[in-house]
Every structure is written in C-alpha cells, then in structure tokens.
Image (cartoon, rainbow, N blue to C red):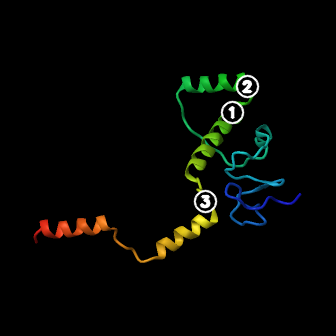
Amino acid sequence: MPCRQRNQRRPLCQHQDPQAKRHIGEKTASYAPTMPYNRTDMSTNTSKRFEFRLQPESKQRIEHAASLVQESTSDFVRAAAEQRADEVLLEHDVVTVVPAEFFYQLLSALDEEPQPSPALARAGDRARRVVSR
C-alpha cells in the first residue's frame, strides 16, 4: 500500500522523508496519536531501552494495574509513556488553520506602512507636553 501523504500531524514515511524515524507498514512511527498498532507485538521489535528507578510502592501499583488489563509491566509502562508523550507533543504542535483569504489579508496588512490612530496621535501629543527632558 502507498504511504500516507503529508499533513499537519503525520509526516511522510521514511522513503519519502529522511527524517522519519521508522516505517511500519503504511503508517509512520511518529507522534501521531491516531496511529493504531499492536503494542504487545512491539516488545519483540524494540531495540532501545529506558531504565529508571521508582519507589517500591509505585512499582507494585504499576504491576497491579498492568495485571488488571492483562498486559506485561513493560508494555503497560511503555503505553503510558507514549500516551503522555503524544499529549505533550500535540499540545506543543498545535497549528492554527485560517481561511486563505484571511491569511492573505493579514499579510497585506502587515506589509502596509503603519498609520497611527487619532487616539494614538493625541496620546503622543499629550506625552510630549507633559514629559520634559
């Protein structure tokens, strides 16, 4: 199947975008939260490790929660970390989309020579009379 085209949340696949991390079928392994994949299959394909220390109570809570959803502790922690990373990345990658006509009006307004409003001109005159150097 061909790879998805570029949009705001999904980069192109590796053979189309050299900065893409890796290619899984027709999906890219990116921060797109809608990307479905089977997390339990990932444990056999991973090659990078995270190691961290935590309190024994926290470890017991995590292990208990993982057993309740019938996942390995590793898959449970990885899924939680990935979900949090997705949330943070989406929060920082927000793109505001505006109609093209509005965008071009904004650009042309920015290119125009600035004209002071009458109120700004009066404030400037008043400041020159009040402030002495």
* Residue under numbered circle 3: 98
Q: Label 2 neighbourhood size at 10 Å, few (<14), some (14-19), many (20+)?
A: few
Question: What kind of residue is marked 1?
Answer: Phe
* Residue under numbered circle 1: 76
Question: What kind of residue is marked 2?
Answer: Val
**If the image is split into quadrants, where does the C terminus sit?**
bottom left
Residue at the image position 58 percent from the left and 70 percent from the top: 104
Place of residue 44 in the rendered image (x, y in percent of width and height, measured from the top left): 79, 43
For the residues marked 1 and 2, what is the alpha-carbon distance in whole angstroms? 9 Å
Residue found farthest to the right: 1
Question: Circle 1 — which element?
Answer: helix
Place of residue 90 in the rendered image (x, y in percent of width and height, measured from the top left): 60, 48
Tell me how many marks there are: 3
Residue found farthest to the left: 132
- Dot 3 or dot 2: first in sequence order is 2
Residue at the image position 37 percent from the left and 73 percent from the top: 115
Front residue of 58 and 99 = 99
- Dot 1 or dot 2: first in sequence order is 2
Q: Label 3 neighbourhood size at 10 Å, few (<14), some (14-19), many (20+)?
A: few
Q: Label 1 neighbourhood size at 10 Å, few (<14), some (14-19), many (20+)?
A: many
Question: Circle 2 — which element?
Answer: loop
* Residue under numbered circle 2: 69
For the residues marked 1 and 3, what is the alpha-carbon distance in whole angstroms? 39 Å
